[in-house]
Image: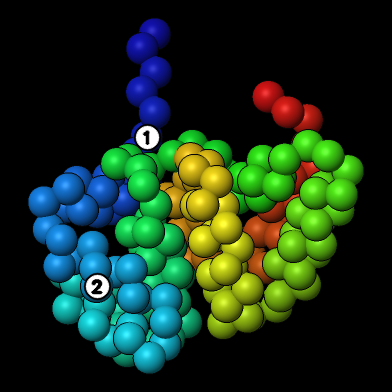
Amino acid sequence: MNEEKKVTAEENLLSSVFKRFATDTAFKAALKKADNPDTEYQSWEYLADYGVNLEYENARLPYTTVLSAAARSSRDADGSVPLGRALLLSYGSDSENKEAARSKLRRIIACDSIEDVCSVLRPVLRFIGSKNIAVSYATLLRDLKYFSKETERTKARWAEQFFGKTE
C-alpha cells in the first residue's frame, strides 16, 4: 500500500513563501519587518495575498511572527525541527547552556496569550535562526494559530519536544 503524507495548509503556505523569497526581494524585506509592531503594516499587502485576517491582531500575530523568522533565515525551504527540539539544539550540549535553554523554554511555556507567546518567541526565533537550525516554520505556525484554543496542549508539546529523547 502506498501511503502519502498529507500536506497541511501551513506546509503549502511556507513552501509558497520560500519559493517567493527566491525571486521577490521586496516581499522578503517586508516580511523581515513583520514582527516589529512599528513596521508590521508594511507586510500587510503581502499577508493579505495569502488570506491572512489583518483586522484581528490575534489572527495576524502567528503569521507575522513565523513569516518574519522565515524571511530572516538563510534557508531556502522549510525545515523539519520542531520548536522545542530547535531550542535545545541551538544552545549546544554543555550543562550551563542547557540551563539557559531550559530557562527560555520555561519563559515560553509560562505564556497564556498569543500576544505574550509571540513577543517572547521573536528573540528566541532570531537566536535559533542565527544557529542555522532547520526549524519547521509550518509546524510552529500551526501551533501558534491554535494556541488560544489549545494553550496547554501546545505548551506540553513544546516541552515534550525539548525534553523528549533524541531521535
What residue type is disc 1 on? Lys
* Res 141 label: none
Q: Earlier in the sequence, mark 1 or mark 2?
A: 1
Say what secondary structure mark 1 lies in.
loop
Q: Position of residue 57 (x, y in %)?
A: 43, 86
The foreground one among 142 and 43 is: 43
- Residue drawn at point x = 42 percent, y = 76 percent: 35
**Callout 1 environment at 10 Å: few (<14), some (14 to 19), or many (20+)?**
few
Question: Colour scheme of this structure image?
Answer: rainbow
Q: Is residue 59 visible?
A: no
Residue receiving disc 2? 30
Q: Quadrant of the C terminus?
A: top right
Rendered view: 2 above or below 64 = above
User: Furthest-top residue in view?
Assistant: 1
- What residue is shown with label 1? 6
Label 1 to label 2: alpha-carbon separation: 30 Å
Residue 41 at x, y = what percent?
28, 87
